[in-house]
Amino acid sequence: MTNRLSGIQEFVAVVEAGGFAAAGERLGLSRSAVGKAVVRLEGRLGVRLCHRTTRVFNLTDDGQVFYERCLRALRELEAAETAIETGRNEPAGRIRISVPVLFGRRCVVPVLMELARQYPKLDLEASFTDRTVDLVEEGYDLAIRNGPVRDNAGLMMRRVARQRMTICASPHYLEQRGSPATFAEIADHDTVVYSLGGRIRSWCFRSISGESYELPLQSRIKFDDLDAIADAATAGMGLAWLPCWLIRDRVRDGELVPILRDIDPLVFDSSALWPRTPHLPTRMRLLIDTLAARLPGMTG
């Protein structure tokens, strides 16, 4: 008996990704395999679903109608899967997650390990990167992002933690150069700054009126790793602007000293994002709820 669902997943992925190569990356298949699956589907249906060249992909009228029907059918299947999963004694299945490198290692991974120990049928796959991933295009179920989220079209979002930032330096540096009493004095100091893709991240603060403002910086020491910046500040290379959770132990041990503590620090949100869906699988809901419950204790 012919598999009536054969090729549908590949066809929908091609439409959503905008091409065969991108769909292949999303599904973990070669471009050729995706193309052959769609051709077989067209042969079984007896219609042409799309026009494609090496550069252009467009749905035919029949393809558009079929795509919309396929979406409805897949949503029904997802709802059925969710209903079955909800009735299980324990969550199961694969979740693919994208997390910032350092925040992911220090804060998210302990939560993932806790879930993995508690639920042996969960399959958790985490990718560590500080770039902004495309969840749908790259096949992620969930991403954690720090700071403002601007590209959330088609995504659901929930705050899972808050991160307070502070300026700090080593006791030796402050003894040698003095401690700035105002933001204007920072311009006379050495700084160690975060830079990614050639762009320096400004230091942000909140004014008395509650509005946030940026302190533009020039520095001869630029890293794209917060741990390396903390190491440089500890070594007396200058002032650094870092998350409180990252420097907590260094402050306790006297290696770093927070300054300008009477200034209200800017607080960043850490958010979980996932593709919009009418039925969120139990395993996803568990992960998001657990992150929201556990991360504030690590970042507070």
Image (tube, grey):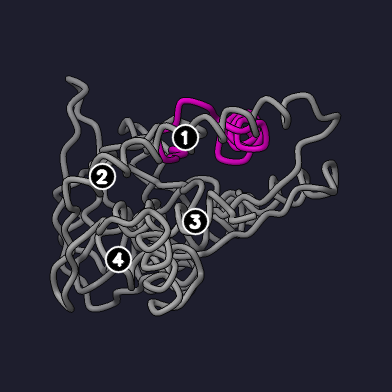
Q: Given the image, on which type of amino acid does mark 2 rest?
A: Ala
* Disc 4 and disc 1 in contact, CB within 8 angstroms: no
Q: Is residue 129 visible?
A: yes
Q: Given the image, on which type of amino acid does mark 3 rest?
A: Ser
**Residue at disc 1, secondary structure:** helix
Could you tell me how far apart the alpha carbons at marks 2 and 4 are, in whole angstroms?
20 Å
Measuring 33% from the left and 73% from the top, which residue is drawn there?
Answer: 21
- Give the residue pinned by disc 1: 73
Give the magenta range.
271-300
Near-viewer residue (173 or 300): 300
* Disc 1 and disc 2 in contact, CB within 8 angstroms: no
Could you tell me how far apart the alpha carbons at marks 2 and 3 are, in whole angstroms?
39 Å
Q: Nearer the viewer, mark 2 or mark 4?
A: 4
- Give the residue pinned by disc 3: 98
Packing grade of label 2 (10 A; few <14, some 14-19, many >=20) is few
Which of pointers 2 and 3 lies earlier in the amino acid sequence?
3
**Residue at disc 4, secondary structure:** strand
* Disc 4 and disc 3 in contact, CB within 8 angstroms: no
Q: Is residue 42 magenta?
A: no
